[in-house]
Amino acid sequence: MATGPRRVLPGFGLSLGWTLTYLSFIVLIPFAALASNAGSLGWDGWYRVTFGARSLAAYKVTFGSAFIAASLNSVFGLAIAWVLVRYRFPMRRLLDAIVDLPFALPAAVGGIALTAIYASNGPIGSYMDAWFGWQTAYSRTGIVLAMAFVSLPFVIRTVEPVLRELDPEIEDAARSLGAGPIRIFLSVTLPQLLPALIAGFALCLARGVGEYGAVIFMSQNLPMLSEVASQLIVIRIEEPNLPSAAGIALVLLVAAFSILLLVNFLQARTAVGRRHA
């Protein structure tokens, strides 16, 4: 007696139900509660809290630092992924494991480690201060370093699988036609890596925007100067003023979600362009 194909999962309906249930309890319901708390301020109160001078200054520091950190990670993360995929060398597996440390470590541990190195009395910070007069820790530079530390693996782990799947024969064909290494990379390799690189950049940006544990150790946390939005949220909670904290958090949530939507759109457009090329 013939039977239809057996499914590993118990059907689409039940699987989707479990998916939506879990997602609701973990993500959707908490976000709804956040919006409800922010809504208790009323429109005028929410606008005053979330777009006051102190909040705007915090957004400027947060998004500006996160953008710089994501840009740096996109460049150096691509280089690290390239080395890990394309070359074989002693202790490569150890280096590959070290890349994931920011995922495994509490963010505060990373912040303490960065402060110990880049503070004015640290092994690197002392030289930066003495030679260049450049204070690394307890400055906006420190905020960028903290955000770059916690978000670096996103670029590497997003680009690495795509880089492994690239067909080296395409690069060999371009080389046989007389193209140099730079032109091969820019015209052949980079376009294929671009969607993954964009996704990694967006994940870095979103991760940096929400970072708290590492940033508070590397910043002076001065209002209007070096205070990030996550620090301002904690301050509002400690006052206590939960609706104001929820209002600022809602701005970060909408911004991060918009970034991810934009990246998904750009990835789709890039994939369509590659298929028609």
Image: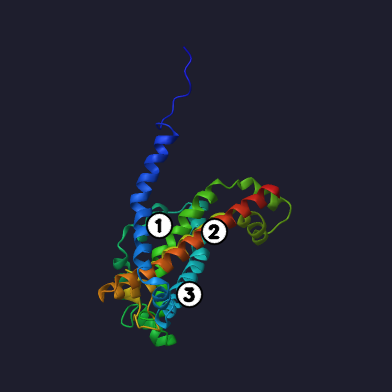
* Residue at 45% across, 58% down: 154
Q: Secondary structure at mark 2?
A: helix
- Residues at discs 3 and 1 in contact (Cβ within 8 Å): no
Mark 1 sits on what residue? 95
Residue sitting farthest toward the top = 1
Place of residue 1 in the rendered image (x, y in percent of width and height, measured from the top left): 46, 11
Place of residue 211 in the rendered image (x, y in percent of width and height, measured from the top left): 37, 67
* Residue at 38% across, 57% down: 100
Mark 3 sits on what residue? 64
Q: Is residue 64 above or below residue 23?
A: below
> What's the amino acid at mark 2?
Val
* Residue at 40% across, 37% down: 15
- Residues at discs 3 and 2 in contact (Cβ within 8 Å): no
Image quadrant where residue 241 sits: bottom left
Mark 2 Cα shell of 10 Å, populated few (<14), some (14-19), many (≥20): some
Image quadrant where residue 51 sits: bottom left
| Image mark for residue 263 | 2
> What's the amino acid at mark 1?
Leu
